[in-house]
Amino acid sequence: MSIDETLYDLLHMIDRMQAKRVVIDSLSGFELALAPQFSEYFRGSLYRMVAELTGRGVTILMTAELEDRYTDLRFSPNGSAFLSDAILVLRYVEIGGQFKRVFSVVKLRGSVHSKDIRLFDITDKGFVIGDRLSEYEGIMTGHPKLRAPSRGERA
């Protein structure tokens, strides 16, 4: 099916269920589910779908798996970051011989927000936000190092 045919079906389901939220997990899987001949038009079609759904007052949560290259900070596949009001980056990094989960709010349209990189965990109590990783640099490059104290800071 094309994304427009998918949108048509989705709108019927939203109306029937009176849904206020839609989750697309993930954009990569969503694109793969479409007929191959529509993939080159995916970005434009996704824009139309988001515009239609948000115009109806529906909140959309989209996840996107990105290849970890560490050399370029991309926040969306297919250049679709402009569609988002908020972008959260979650990734694994190696610190002290262990994989750690970190996250940061990259974009929150119309809002001043923290730009800290923080540890997080997912427990049986939910999403637990941990410490700010201010003592490290290079976390998002994949090569975190302890930051040298600047003049006036304690070592």
Image (tube, rainbow, N blue to C red):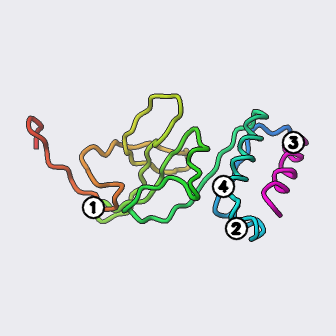
Residue 35 vertical placement versus 116 (above, below): below
Answer with left or right where residue 70 lies relative to residue 125.
left
Residues marked 2 and 4 touching at CB (< 8 Å)? no
Answer with left or right where residue 134 lies relative to residue 85.
left
Q: Which of the pair 36/115 is nearer the observer?
A: 36
Q: Gap between marks 1 and 2, in whole Å?
A: 37 Å
Point out the residue furthest to the top here. 111
Q: Which of the pair 148/30 is nearer the observer?
A: 30
Specify which label sits upstream in the sequence, 4 or 1.
Answer: 4
What amino acid type should be assigned to the residue bearing mark 2?
Leu
Answer with left or right where residue 106 lies relative to residue 86.
left
Classify residue 50 by image quadrant: top right
Residues marked 4 and 1 touching at CB (< 8 Å)? no
Mark 4 nearby-residue class (10 Å; few <14, some 14–19, many ≥20): some
Q: Check disc 3 and report the residue beneath it.
A: 17
Instruction: State the residue at coordinates (49%, 40%).
Output: 107
Q: Nearer the viewer, mark 3 or mark 2?
A: 2
Q: Check disc 2 and report the residue beneath it.
A: 32
Q: Check disc 1 and report the residue beneath it.
A: 96
What amino acid type should be assigned to the residue bearing mark 3?
Met
Q: Check disc 4 and report the residue beneath it.
A: 43
Label 3 secondary element: helix
Residues marked 3 and 1 touching at CB (< 8 Å)? no
Magenta-colored stretch includes residue 39: no
Label 2 secondary element: helix
What amino acid type should be assigned to the residue bearing mark 1?
Gly
What amino acid type should be assigned to the residue bearing mark 4?
Arg
Q: Gap between marks 2 and 4, in whole Å?
A: 13 Å
Span colored in magenta: 1-17
Specify which label sits upstream in the sequence, 3 or 4.
Answer: 3
Specify which label sits upstream in the sequence, 3 or 2.
Answer: 3
Specify which label sits upstream in the sequence, 1 or 2.
Answer: 2
